[in-house]
Image (spheres, rainbow, N blue to C red):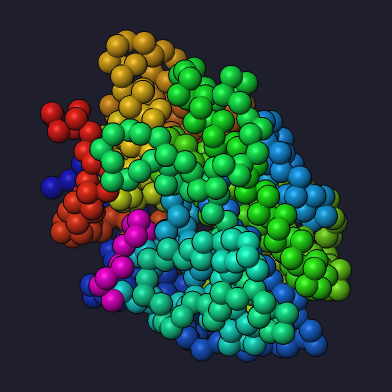
Amino acid sequence: MALFPGMSEALQARRLGVAMRAVGRPCRVELSLAFVGVLLLSGTVSSQPPELAKPQRRPNILWIVAENIGPDLGCYGMHQVQTPNLDRLASQGVRYTRVFATSPVCAPSRSAIMTGMYQTTTDTHHMRSHRDDDFRLPPGVRPLTHWLKDAGYFTANIRTIGSQWVGTGKLDLNFVNEGPIFESEDWSALKNRQPFFAMINLPEVEYDIYDRKCAKKERVEWVGEREHPQIAHPDKVTPPPYYPDHPITRQEWARYLNAVSGLDRRVGWILEALRRDGLEDDTVIVFFADNGRLEARGIHWCYDSGLHVPMIIRWPKNFPAPPSWKAGSVSGQVISLLDLTATTLAIAGLPRPPLMQSRIFLGPQADPPRTYAFSARDRIDETVNRIRTVRDARYRYIRNYMPEQSFLALNRYKEKCFLVIPLMRQLHAEGKLSGPPLALMRSRLPEEELYDTAADPYEIHNLAESKKPEHQQALVRLRTALDTWITETGDRGWVPEPPEVVARFEKEMHEWFGTPVWYRKR
């Protein structure tokens, strides 16, 4: 029986050579023996907080987390947006241009960020898994906030500042918490509870685009849509070239860009509150997104559009800046969003725990810069898939373990909430698509994809079969890097979920979004 249905026998055999056999009970994942063996060489696995060499004073740390946006701010060169607050933040801090999420969807990505462990290592890689099976993290793996709390940090997940709604309080983690993740939601408590670690999850670019329970495709407003600055107009925007030029496509793209402009307003409220409450000069501010763009070929897919995220870090005046820090500078270093965990601990004066896979990219304890950022996509909602990818400073390599699960595969949420998808199905049936939009509608994905993101930022031209020496060299190098990562991290993605778990999501998504006629008529 084939472990990877739809994949050629040759590629399947090669993949089996690096597949790791995961062991463990249903509700307690155990890290692969190979992975734990490597870790034990450098320290004892423990759930106790690492020893802390306490500095006299430690900075506050504030994460401002956007949901579902790419690096589409004014300071990143995006047109048809206005993001003055984030642009100003970038001018006062460091703007990072090569930061990539470990997953193109929120729950696995957030599970990785909160633990500093790849979701594929800890069995938290499927979308919204382990919500009711009493699943626990492996011994020695803990939420970031628990390490910080043990070291004296007050932790808060902020929803409001006074009467202003600034955050959703979203966690969306694929594990049962060992006690509360945060201690408070109260902004007013921060001033007297320093040092603090606070997170604000911005609500703007949300996925509740259409009424979930309505079978029709009736448009409803986004969260806060009436407040969004109407900077982008459908007749003036340029959607990505893998979509057809059509009023619906232009409307969706303009709507996304206006939501980006809208979230900047809330960032302004937050920065003003920091100034007003006397916290600005003692607080490290980190702005980033949990995964890539809210667009049909963005979230859920392992292209840059689904994984490339913005990150801006501003250092406070009352604390010495890290070596080589320069306000207003730009870093092109390859960073995995996973690395934010260990870097946050380092900012707080804490060493990295023994098990943690996250790397430090800032400060005197910084690890050597990454060459590669690795990411993974597994089941999302009712749609079962398995994709692995690796990105360096220029090339992206993608491996599709289930090539039959193409852009045409049913995902009820995306089918209802992104009108460009049914539009493209219709235009394809009518023979009205050509070029990249037509290629997007193929029934099977390539088993391997390779893109030169410098020459092809929209990742349209697959170079996996190119005969040019530089492309073949990149293919072999990235293919090998991915194989090594899968082995060394104990990737559990090859272990299928129980059928009853997938069936439950199938039922839930049908109840929420309905099932399109074309699928019912198959």
Please tell me which residue lies in front, 475 or 124: 124
Residue under the image location 47 percent in, 57 percent down: 109
Residue 9 on the magenta segment: no
Total residue callouts: 0
Residue under the image location 61 percent in, 42 percent down: 228
Residue under the image location 74 percent in, 65 percent down: 273
Q: Quadrant of residue 420 in the image?
A: top left
Locate residue 48 relative to residue 519 in the image: left or right: right
Q: Which quarter of the rendering shows the C terminus?
A: top left
Q: Is residue 238 above or below residue 272?
A: above
Please tell me which residue lies in front, 461 or 202: 202
| Residue 436 in view in this figure | no
| Residue 229 in view in this figure | yes
Locate residue 317 relative to residue 107 in the image: left or right: right
| Rendering coords of residue 240 (x, y %) | 53, 26
Q: Magenta segment range?
A: 125-134
Residue extending furthest toward the top: 431
| Rendering coords of residue 474 (x, y %) | 54, 36
Please tell me which residue lies in front, 112 or 521: 521
Locate residue 321 relative to residue 95 in the image: left or right: right
Q: Is residue 37 above or below residue 331?
A: below
Residue 128 on the magenta segment: yes
Q: Is residue 235 above or below residue 75?
A: above
Residue under the image location 23 percent in, 33 percent down: 516
| Rendering coords of residue 394 (x, y %) | 61, 38
| Rendering coords of residue 244 (x, y %) | 45, 19
**Overall secondary structure of the magenta section:** loop
